[in-house]
Image: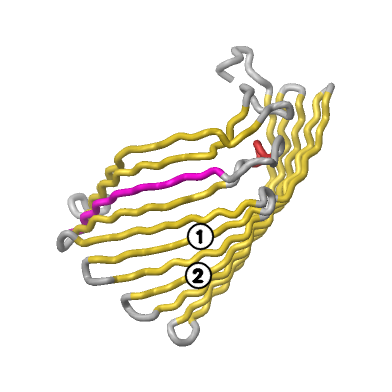
């Protein structure tokens, strides 16, 4: 720890298990089906100086998706998801002990449509709705992208998306009276593909809102939590791949 030259004695023991199963089938009249589920178990034992922390998380994720191809120009997909999470934490130190338990269950439904207007112009529209049982909160996330071919081997695309993310368990163990954190993405992309070469330039701007804040250097049971945080990220990414000039490299 850079703030403590003498260091902090730390010990960590982790056990985890993950499994999943999925099923897909092509149905009649251009319909297709996908269904899946997964289960995760995680246990962490952490010792920091004289403090002992034991976390146990059980989580399941179920998903169902239907897709319909109306033509080569129009496709529609929609589905539903269910996230089930149970989290337990036991905390103890010589003069204090506490136990925390909460269920963070989320129900979601979404729909997405693809439109190919011509050989040069295409669009994708989507909407996702989520309900958080823990916060009694419903969120709506519109998302869209458009792409246009500006040349034989190149295209320009623009994407917008609204996303929500639950606070991490490290905050929820202290305060469950919070909201989902929000991000808005704006991405402008140019891509050129020819002769086993790819060049991509991407400019992005991302706004963050309702980020988790607390009033201590390190959060604990006496900290005051809120969703007052905000921020942004912006930049340009450049990517180049060449499978032609140097073979096998």
Stretch in magenta? 181-194
Q: Which residue is mark 1?
A: 128
Write the residue at 18% across / 51% down.
245
What mark, if any, has residue 78 been given in the picture?
2
The quarter of the picture where residue 21 lies is bottom right
- The answer to whether residue 17 shows anywhere in this view is no
Residue 37, placed above or below residue 161: below
Using residue 118 as the reference point, say whether residue 17 is left or right of it: right
Q: Residues within 10 Å of mark 1 (few under 14, many from 20)?
A: some
Residue 188 is a magenta residue: yes
Residue 186 is a magenta residue: yes
* SS type, badge 2: strand
Residue 227, placed above or below residue 87: above
Using residue 79 as the reference point, say whether residue 186 is left or right of it: left
The quarter of the picture where residue 168 lies is top right
Write the residue at 62% across / 34% down.
226
Q: Percent x, y for residue 125?
A: 39, 63
Q: Percent x, y for residue 154?
A: 20, 58
Write the residue at 75% across / 38% down.
54
């Amino acid at each position: 720890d850079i703030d403590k030259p003498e260091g902090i004695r730390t010990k960590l023991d982790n056990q985890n298990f993950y499994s999943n199963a999925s099923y897909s089938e092509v149905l009649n009249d251009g319909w297709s089906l996908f269904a899946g589920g997964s289960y995760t178990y995680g246990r962490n034992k952490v010792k920091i100086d004289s403090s002992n922390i034991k976390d146990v998380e059980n989580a399941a994720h179920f998903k169902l998706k239907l897709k319909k191809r109306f033509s080569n120009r129009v496709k529609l997909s929609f589905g539903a998801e269910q996230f089930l999470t149970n989290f337990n934490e036991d905390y103890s130190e010589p003069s204090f002990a506490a136990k925390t338990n909460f269920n963070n269950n989320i129900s979601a439904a979404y729909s997405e449509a693809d439109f190919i207007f011509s050989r040069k112009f295409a669009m994708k529209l989507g909407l996702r709705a989520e309900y958080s049982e823990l916060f009694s909160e419903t969120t709506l996330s519109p998302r869209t992208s458009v792409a246009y071919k500006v040349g034989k081997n190149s295209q320009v695309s623009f994407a917008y998306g609204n996303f929500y993310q639950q606070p991490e368990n490290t905050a929820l163990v202290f305060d469950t009276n919070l909201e989902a954190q929000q991000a808005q993405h704006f991405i402008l992309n140019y891509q050129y593909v020819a002769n086993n070469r790819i060049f991509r330039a991407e400019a992005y701007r991302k706004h963050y809102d309702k980020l988790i804040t607390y009033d201590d250097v390190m959060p604990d049971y006496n900290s005051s939590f809120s969703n007052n945080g905000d921020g942004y990220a912006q930049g340009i990414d450049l990517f180049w791949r060449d499978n032609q000039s140097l073979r096998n490299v």
